[in-house]
């Protein structure tokens, strides 16, 4: 269709543009030759123009053979002109130095904007999916869910800072839209001494999965251990993080985050939902002293095992107050490992094999508290121990096709009462993810859940995800 | 509180001011891809240490942002990148973590090779239904020797800004490189001159600049659109075109799917040529001139047989 329009407009052109002026166009092009390196395009345009001019004259009632002859002459002269140009170019090009190419206008904008849209379809032998899938961006009902529509804005603020904002839209079970400022932070670009400061609201660097957004996870749902330690929304809060890249030959980075310890995104700390952990009435507790803030240190290191194998090791901690009592505190410790092999001849990043594992343990210091279920009952001061692990392997079979296998388990020691959230659980999952391009993703996942005392469940999850806008740069 | 004060003082410290590297120390140069690294070696000579982040054999669009690269970039005096979005899937994440202001865009230590290059296939509209099209145009521009000339001039200029003491060396290396390139360029043109207008097929849209410079025509790519895997329907069309145009050469890079190329070649009686754009991917092509010699000779030989 557009081709037709071009031909028509060129034909009209031929009426108004005499042959002589076409010649002058050609000589103009020759005059600019030394400045125009990209000559093929000009040649092709000229060729098209001249040929179409001939075609255009077809309407001008001339006998067919003379048209053919004229076209032949045009083509002959054009071929000669092209040869001359080519020769001239070849001689010019070996002259040094080459002139600078004309500057081109800058592309892009002052910030990148992108949007990630996720649609799930889930079915399970369990009717209540919210007990099976614990993550905030996991499917919540049998049928369709839209658990994540993420608007990401980022860019350089100035030479000193980078700014990032993640605004998340999601639909709940009733189709109501929820909006949250998931992340919003600045990041310094050039502090001395290998330091870097981040400030705002952000996912804290505890282990691997917590700091990643769901669309870069290898599976369609949150791991059990992350849900237990940090709740469905992960560990994020308002705070500041200082990081130091050690001057070692291999990668070593030390980080520490200081953040607010209250709210739904700090589940093991001053969270209103802490009754789900300790079973008592939550105490409204404010910040009395600096140690009522949340402290999250992390140390990570990485080695190249071979030319094609990399390993990253990390140790993290999270320390802060909880609201089972005025002096109660929680500490969480975790270790993580990530190993990846990628073929030296990787095409689009495939084939590869990766293994990622995280283990965490939590000591939840529960104070003497009134039972949430029975106000006449006082629960004793005690330490509630929880631990959990997941191991996941991904195999990038061929470009854009990934097979995944994950095993996970969580365990809570018996306290005076064991809330459902602290019960033992284990799960096996396998999935197959097809990336039609880097910008879209189709995933099918099967989960086999074991909840002692509740039963075993089978679940199937279908996911479709798209990315609009800026090319995401992936962290390792 | 004291720590916060100290931090604010750090932040107020002058940032990004170029500190010329002492004449005794070698410049730490990091290139994103081996082709840029090879050019940096030609110009920097003994005054520089050069490493490439991408391996010669791997797809430069998809390099892992490995932590070891963060360390490499953290210690670099100079970064040479294509600057035309080839590395956009991995370099920004690395630079964010590397916290090295010497490599900030616009700093003397940041050489964006595509600046000053006339790009081909610059999209009229940003539309990903046409595949993974780069907004700045086709980023595989180093296979055109005249583009290389522009890039080395820029490298010499910025090396000299960062290490003024070695400026005479860089100027001498540049002059030597250019005169060798002129001689080689004439040879390469001569070698391919008999095949003016000859048609070839490539896997990806990565030999367009070479074809334009040496008057070859890329009639089809095995990928239907950049970054999109070949489909049977598209390959059938490629085969039809190759037969109609009597195309006898399919060019693949080491990381691309050779089997697809072989399938098409069997049906069209064509040959599959393994040509890398990265020095070191194929034996005996460690330097820029060896690589180009290999590229031109391999193509000329194949086109000669086809005749």
Image (cartoon, coloured by chain):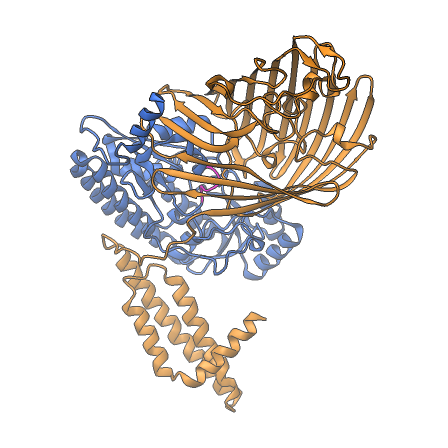
Chain colours: A orange, B blue
Left or right of B178, for residue A346: right
Q: Main secondary structure of the magenta part?
A: loop
Decide whether residue B87 is among the magenta residues.
Answer: yes
Q: Is residue A254 above or below residue A443?
A: above
From this view, report whether residue B306 is shown above or below residue A145: below
**Residue A428 point in image, percent of width and height:** 73, 23
Magenta region = B86-90
Image location of residue B206, percent across then percent down: 47, 49
Q: Which residue lies furthest to the front in this view?
A: A376
Q: Is residue B290 visible?
A: no
Q: Is residue B232 left or right of residue A74?
A: right
Vertical placement of A342 versus A281: above or below?
Answer: below
Compared across the picture, whether A333 is left or right of B208 comes to: right
How many numbered discs sit on the rendered protein?
A: 0
Q: For residue B277, what is the image quadrant?
A: top left
Q: Where is residue B189 in the image (x, y as percent from the top left)?
A: 34, 54
Give residue B266's position: percent from left, percent from top: 61, 48
User: If the image is split into quadrants, where does the N terminus of chain A sit?
Assistant: bottom right
Q: Is residue A394 left or right of residue A347?
A: right
- The residue drawn where x is 47% and y is 23% is A258
Q: Does the magenta stretch include residue A51?
A: no
Residue ID at (36%, 42%): A158
Residue, x 18% and y 34% (percent of image)? B166
Does residue A200 appear anywhere in the picture?
Answer: yes
């Amino acid at each position: 269709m557009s081709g037709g329009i071009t031909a028509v407009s060129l034909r009209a052109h031929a009426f108004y543009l005499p042959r002589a002026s076409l010649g002058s166009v050609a000589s103009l092009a020759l005059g600019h030759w030394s400045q125009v390196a990209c000559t093929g395009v000009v040649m092709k345009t000229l060729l098209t123009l001249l040929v179409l001019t001939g075609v255009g004259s077809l309407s001008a009632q001339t006998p067919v053979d003379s048209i053919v002859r004229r076209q032949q002459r045009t083509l002959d002269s054009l071929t000669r002109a092209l040869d001359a140009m080519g020769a001239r170019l070849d001689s010019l090009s070996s002259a040094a130095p080459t002139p600078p190419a004309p500057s081109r206008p800058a592309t892009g904008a002052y910030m990148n904007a992108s949007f990630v849209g996720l649609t799930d379809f889930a079915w399970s032998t369990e009717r209540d999916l919210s007990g099976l899938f614990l993550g905030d961006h996991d499917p919540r009902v049998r049928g369709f869910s839209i658990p994540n529509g993420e608007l990401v804005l980022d860019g350089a603020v100035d030479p000193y800072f980078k700014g990032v904002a993640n605004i998340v839209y999601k639909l709940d079970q009733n189709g109501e839209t929820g909006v949250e400022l998931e992340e919003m932070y600045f990041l310094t670009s050039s502090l001395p001494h290998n330091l870097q400061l981040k400030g705002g609201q952000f996912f804290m660097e505890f282990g691997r999965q917590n700091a990643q957004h769901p669309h870069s996870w290898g599976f369609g749902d949150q791991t059990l251990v992350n849900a237990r330690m940090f709740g469905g929304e992960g560990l994020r809060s308002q705070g500041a993080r200082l990081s130091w890249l050690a001057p070692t030959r291999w990668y070593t980075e030390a980080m520490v985050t200081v953040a607010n310890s209250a709210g739904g995104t700090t589940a093991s700390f001053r969270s209103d939902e802490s009754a789900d952990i300790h079973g008592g009435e939550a105490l409204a507790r404010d910040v009395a002293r600096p140690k009522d803030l949340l402290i999250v240190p992390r140390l990570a290191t990485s080695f190249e095992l071979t030319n094609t194998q990399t390993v990253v090791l990390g140790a993290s901690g999270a320390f802060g107050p909880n609201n089972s009592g005025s002096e109660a505190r929680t500490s969480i410790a975790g270790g993580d490992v990530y190993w990846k092999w990628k073929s030296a001849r990787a095409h689009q990043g495939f084939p590869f094999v990766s293994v990622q594992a995280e283990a965490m343990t939590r000591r939840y210091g529960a104070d003497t508290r009134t039972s949430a279920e029975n106000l006449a009952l006082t629960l004793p001061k005690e330490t509630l121990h929880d631990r959990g692990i997941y191991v996941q392997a991904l195999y990038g079979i061929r470009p854009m096709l990934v097979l995944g296998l994950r095993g996970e388990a969580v365990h809570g020691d018996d306290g005076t009462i064991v809330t459902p959230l602290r019960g033992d659980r284990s799960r096996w999952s396998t999935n197959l993810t097809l990336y039609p391009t880097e910008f879209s993703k189709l995933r099918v996942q099967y989960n086999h859940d074991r909840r002692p005392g509740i039963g075993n469940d089978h679940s199937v999850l279908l996911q479709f995800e798209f990315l609009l806008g800026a090319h995401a740069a992936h962290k390792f | 509180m004291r720590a916060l004060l100290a931090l604010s003082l750090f932040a107020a410290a002058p940032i990004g001011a170029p500190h010329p590297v002492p004449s005794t120390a070698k410049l730490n140069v990091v290139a994103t891809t081996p082709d840029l690294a090879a050019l940096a070696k030609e110009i920097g000579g003994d005054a520089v240490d050069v490493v490439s982040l991408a391996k010669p054999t791997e797809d430069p669009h998809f390099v892992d942002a490995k932590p070891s690269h963060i360390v490499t970039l953290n210690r670099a005096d100079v970064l040479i990148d294509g600057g035309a979005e080839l590395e956009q899937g991995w370099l920004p994440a690395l630079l964010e973590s590397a916290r090295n202001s010497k490599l900030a865009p616009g700093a003397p230590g940041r050489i964006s090779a595509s600046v000053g290059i006339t790009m081909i296939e610059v999209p009229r509209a940003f539309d990903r239904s046409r595949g993974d099209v780069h907004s700045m145009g086709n980023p595989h521009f180093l296979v055109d020797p005249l583009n290389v000339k522009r890039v080395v001039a820029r490298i010499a200029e910025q090396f000299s800004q960062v290490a003024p003491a070695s400026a005479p060396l860089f100027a001498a290396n540049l002059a030597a490189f250019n005169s060798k390139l002129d001689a080689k360029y004439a040879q390469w043109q001569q070698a391919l001159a008999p095949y003016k207008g000859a048609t070839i097929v490539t896997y990806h849209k990565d030999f367009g600049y070479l074809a334009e410079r040496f008057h070859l025509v890329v009639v089809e790519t095995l990928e239907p659109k950049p970054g999109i895997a070949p489909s049977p329907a598209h390959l059938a069309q490629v085969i039809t075109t190759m037969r109609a145009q009597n195309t006898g050469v399919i060019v693949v890079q080491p990381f691309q799917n050779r089997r697809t190329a072989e399938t098409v070649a069997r049906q069209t009686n064509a040959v599959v040529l393994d040509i890398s754009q990265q020095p070191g991917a194929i034996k005996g092509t460690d330097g820029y001139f060896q690589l180009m010699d290999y590229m031109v000779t391999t193509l000329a030989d194949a086109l000669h047989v086809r005749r």
